[in-house]
Amino acid sequence: MHTQISRLLALWGTLPSIVRTTVWILIITIVVILCVAFLTLWERKVIGWMQLRRGPNRVRIFGLLPGMGQPFADVVKLLTKEVVIPSRANKFLFRLAPVLALVPALAAWAVIPLSPQLVVSKANAGLLYLLALSSMGVYGIILAGWAANSKYAFLGAMRSAAQMVAYEIAMGFALVGVLMAAGSMSLGTIVGHQEGGILAWNWFWLFPLLIVYFISGVAETNRAPFDVAEGESEIVAGFHVEYSGIAFALFFLAEYANMILISALTAVFFFGGWLSPFAGYPLIGATLLGDPSFFWLGLKVFVFLFLFLWIRATFPRYRYDQIMRLGWKALIPVTLVWLGAEMLMAAVHVGPWAKPWFH
Amino acid sequence: MRLTGEATAVLVEILFYAFATLLVAGALGVITARNPVYSALFLVFAFINSAGIWLLSEAEFLALVLVLVYVGAVMVLFLFVVMMLDINIAELRRGFTRFAWLGWLTACALVAEIVGVVWTHGLAGVDVSKGFVPEPAGFSNTRALGEVLYTRYVYPFELAAVLLVVAIVAAIALTLRRRPGLKTQDVARQVAVRAEDRVRVVKIAAEKRS
């Protein structure tokens, strides 16, 4: 058995790198999609518990685990439904829009370091790549709203466009702060430079930026309380009101994949990615728990995903003008002030700027 | 599969011509599409292809910033406006032949300028016949660009930034109109409001049933 595994590993090593990369891309995509499936279930469960309900508890897997079969039942239901294309819709763009929404959410995983050894691409402009991709996600929503030729869909798309542009600026500025603390745009380096225990992670020195980044992340994914693009109480379902079946499912997939992505990025930028919180402590730091591994990244992603759901279950929806006000007049000034504060910190060499690579 | 140098060069060449063809096709689409929304989308397509060409020539910073700024922000706002406009296309096309000579003139002037730069000067020290020379490994063009903008040409750069700010302020000032009698919300007052300002709790003595 052991020899077989080592032989397989040896075979894996001899494969051409293009094949290995493709296999990794496939694995990551499938895992992300599976995570989305179970995230939908987890969301309904968590919100159910918060509202003193049970949440989905009927569909079982092999008669066990009540509720665990729900995502698969949903997928089967959505796959077997008809995709209705409105007769006055722009058919090409109507079909293209869900794909445009989903692709950036999956493509972004290329540069995210999953563990110290594992990353698909060590691009040294990884941070810019992420910003560029996340800014392209809005096209799926705008085109969906416009192509459907429906007033509700169009209103949702317009709201979403304005919101995305506003919060992208705040997000970008927050990431400029991360960049200043790491001195690099490569995500692996950003994580590596946070080494040295919990207080060395970026969240401590860049706390306001963390808050701004996460709020912008919630807004960018069009999640409650920033979900005016959907706004089911005002504009039915917003931009995807005319979508049904698997086309609707793609939008759903894109939204949840984006949530996972934002959670992973928050972990990478502000909470040390795959670094262990126990590293550097006596006794426990020397054990397996102190080692950097994918487990820690997964745990952090899970915590932030829970935060997404918690926020959704807690806050009422923002009014549109309040969203604009928060984005332009609260978040962006906060980031600007903190960038100034970072300059001072860098000048007197405290926090991350006390480390050797800044001398 | 480590590609050999020659194979990489061939691959780069194929990609370049693919991107270039799509870029030209997209640019043609921008000016020939009847629907302005299509024009804007063709422009987005053209931007993405030119970003691809820049990536091939190892200008990844410029390529990604092009996508980030133009595709992600500028064109979204463009679409935002274009989609909301109710444009009469026939009206727009009426002046087409009348102003065609102006368009041709501009196009010719642009081409002449490009030709002038490429063939007469500006390419000193660059051997065009050798093709593209890749940078050594570990070269970061983000750093190189930063050095040029923020160290060598920091004052012109800052001056340009100030100019942009002035332009923004001017644009806002030109379009800012104050209408009398306009009812707006004062958010500070909205936030500061308290229950006592809105709700009066009245205590009414219970009446005795007669």
Image (tube, rainbow, N blue to C red):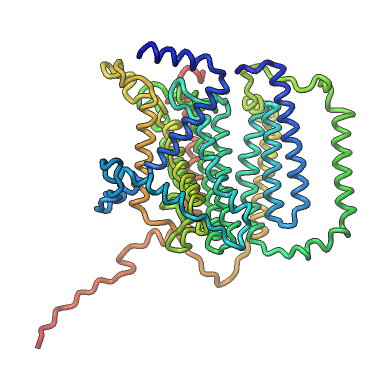
Q: How many marks?
A: 0
Whole-percent x, y for residue B76 in the image: 62, 49
Q: In screen coordinates, is A225 left or right of B110?
A: left
A91 lies above or below A335: below
In this rendered view, identify the residue nearer to me: B25 or A310. Answer: B25
Whole-percent x, y for residue A301 in the image: 39, 35
A6 lies above or below A256: above
Q: In screen coordinates, is B16 left or right of A321?
A: right
Q: Residue at x 69, y 51 (%)?
A: B40
Whole-percent x, y for residue A159 in the image: 53, 56
Tell me, yes or no, if residue A336 can be seen here. no
Residue that extends furthest to the bottom in the rendered view of this protein: B210
Quadrant position of residue A99: top right
Tell me, yes or no, if residue B106 can be seen here. yes
Q: In screen coordinates, is A237 left or right of B130?
A: left
Q: Quadrant of the C terminus of chain B?
A: bottom left
In this rendered view, identify the residue nearer to me: A259 or A326. Answer: A259
In this rendered view, identify the residue nearer to me: B40 or A254. Answer: A254
Whole-percent x, y for residue A51 in the image: 27, 53
